[in-house]
Amino acid sequence: MQLNVNTAADAARNSAFAPKTLAQLGRGESGVLDHLDLPDDIARRLMELGFLPGQEIVPARSAPGGGPRVYRVDGSEVALRRETASRLILRSISKGDNRKT
């Protein structure tokens, strides 16, 4: 019988390699969009606004009370609900890559 105990160190190590979502970016961080995990019509509209795979996205302002958050992408500022931002998946960065996500 094997017993597997997850420690805080294991969780931190695993989370470093887990894909991050746009909603998880903190102020001052930036990320590169990998893909949109949304229905086709919503994904298409966001891509028209500049949310394209490979595009760098920077969080800006946030509404009080956790409302919509403004993101800077492709020279524009777009407000997204947290639920929508949590479906935009950022690229995982390998250890040798020094770009932020």
Image: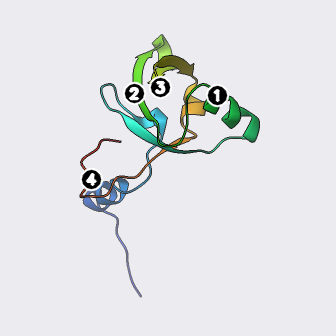
Mark 1 → mark 2, Cα distance in angstroms:
17 Å
Q: Quick one: which residue is furthest to the bottom in this view?
A: 1
- Residue type at mark 1: give it: Glu
Residue at horizontal 67 percent and vertical 36 percent from the top: 43
Q: Which mark is residue 58?
A: 2
| Contact (Cβ within 8 Å) of mark 3 with mark 2 | yes
Can you give x and y, in whole percent of width and height, for residue 68 in the image? 54, 18
Of labels 4 and 3, earlier in sequence is 3
Mark 4 → mark 3, Cα distance in angstroms:
22 Å
Q: Count numbered badges in the picture.
A: 4
Q: Which mark is residue 48?
A: 1
Q: Nearer the viewer, mark 1 or mark 2?
A: 1
Q: In this view, does 60 lie above or below 39?
A: above
- Residue type at mark 3: give it: Val
Q: Quick one: which residue is furthest to the top in this view?
A: 64
The residue carrying mark 3 is 73
Crowd rating for badge 1 (residues with CA inside 10 Å; few <14, some 14–19, many 20+): few
Residue at horizontal 75 percent and vertical 35 percent from the top: 41
Of labels 4 and 2, earlier in sequence is 2
Q: Is mark 3 on a helix, strand or loop?
A: strand
User: In which quadrant of the rendered view does residue 61 lie?
Assistant: top left
Mark 1 → mark 4, Cα distance in angstroms:
29 Å
| Contact (Cβ within 8 Å) of mark 3 with mark 1 | no
Can you give x and y, in whole percent of width and height, for residue 90 in the image? 46, 44
Q: Is mark 2 on a helix, strand or loop?
A: strand
